[in-house]
């Protein structure tokens, strides 16, 4: 069972539809305690990073505890940004801190008509960390198109498995042991996005059945 975490800023309707289309079983927990039986968690999000402040200490602790126990966690858009240490968009609001680095504002480029917010389709540029161990990208090739809508983004670090460029290059997808994140919206990214969600669900099922995952050593 997947716990779809709702903190009041998630695009839950489209994520629900995508999970339903893939045949996934999921719940939207009303309290942190309802996450206890989940085999995996998804934290979606749209809008301002400040909204993640609604994930108070009790939520943060149960999510962090599940991750420490090996449960797969997927952050989507602002949910991915929350995996990092914090964001310049809301400097007083901490992230979960399971990914190193800080979220910064995109720069844009007026001469090239690259506006902020960045809205539209961009190609995934696979990074060295994606080959051969990135489970989130199984079945996809570098150059796959996905849909973005955001003004802030994560840096390209050793955990970045796919980047993209909009004036500057930033992390489009990250993977670190059992923690995954995508800056784009897989639920709005056609077949490529559904494949990524399917891959995450497969990781969750492997975890539920106790199948050893193809994880990288925690750095």
Image (spheres, grey):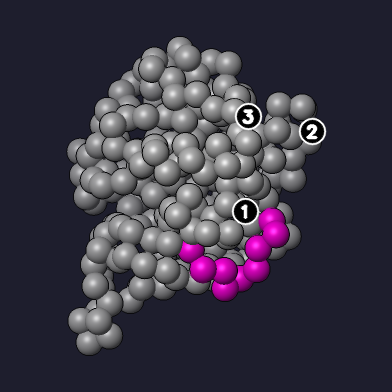
Q: Secondary structure at mark 1?
A: helix
To which residue does mark 3 refer? 70
Question: Which label belongs to residue 195?
Answer: 1
Q: Earlier in the sequence, mark 1 or mark 3?
A: 3
Residue 28 placement (x, y as % from top left): 44, 24
Q: Main secondary structure of the magenta part?
A: loop
Residue at point 69%, 56% (across, down): 138
Q: Nearer the viewer, residue 89 or 24?
A: 24
- In magenta stretch: residue 176: no
Residue 196 placement (x, y as % from top left): 59, 52
Mark 2 surroundings: few (<14), some (14-19) or many (≥20) residues within 10 A:
few
Question: Which label belongs to residue 211?
Answer: 2
Q: Is 43 situated above or below 31? A: below
- In magenta stretch: residue 139: yes
Q: Nearer the viewer, residue 205 or 73?
A: 205
Q: Secondary structure at mark 3?
A: loop
Q: Is 161 situated above or below 60? A: below
Residue at point 63%, 46% (across, down): 198
Q: Which residues are magenta?
A: 138-146
The answer for how far apart the CA atoms under marks 2 and 1 are is 20 Å
The answer for how far apart the CA atoms under marks 2 and 3 are is 12 Å
């Amino acid at each position: 069972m997947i716990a779809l975490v709702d903190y009041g800023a998630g695009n839950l309707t489209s994520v629900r539809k995508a999970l339903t289309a893939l045949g996934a079983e999921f719940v939207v927990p009303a309290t942190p305690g309802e996450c206890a039986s989940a085999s995996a968690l998804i934290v979606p999000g749209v809008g301002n990073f400040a909204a993640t402040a609604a994930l108070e200490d009790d939520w943060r602790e149960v999510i962090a505890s599940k991750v420490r126990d090996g449960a797969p966690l997927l952050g989507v858009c602002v949910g991915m940004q929350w995996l990092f240490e914090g964001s310049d968009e809301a400097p007083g609001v901490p992230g979960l801190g399971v990914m190193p680095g800080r979220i910064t504002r995109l720069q844009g480029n007026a001469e090239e008509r690259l506006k902020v917010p960045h809205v539209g389709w961009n190609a995934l540029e696979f990074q060295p960390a994606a080959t051969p161990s990135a489970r989130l990208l199984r079945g996809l090739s570098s150059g796959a198109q996905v849909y973005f809508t955001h003004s802030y983004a994560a840096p390209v670090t050793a955990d970045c498995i796919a980047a993209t460029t909009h004036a500057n290059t930033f992390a489009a997808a990250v993977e670190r042991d059992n923690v995954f994140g995508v800056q784009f919206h897989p639920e709005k990214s056609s077949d490529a996005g559904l494949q990524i969600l399917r891959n995450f669900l497969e990781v969750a099922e492997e975890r539920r059945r106790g199948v050893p995952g193809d994880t990288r050593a925690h750095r």
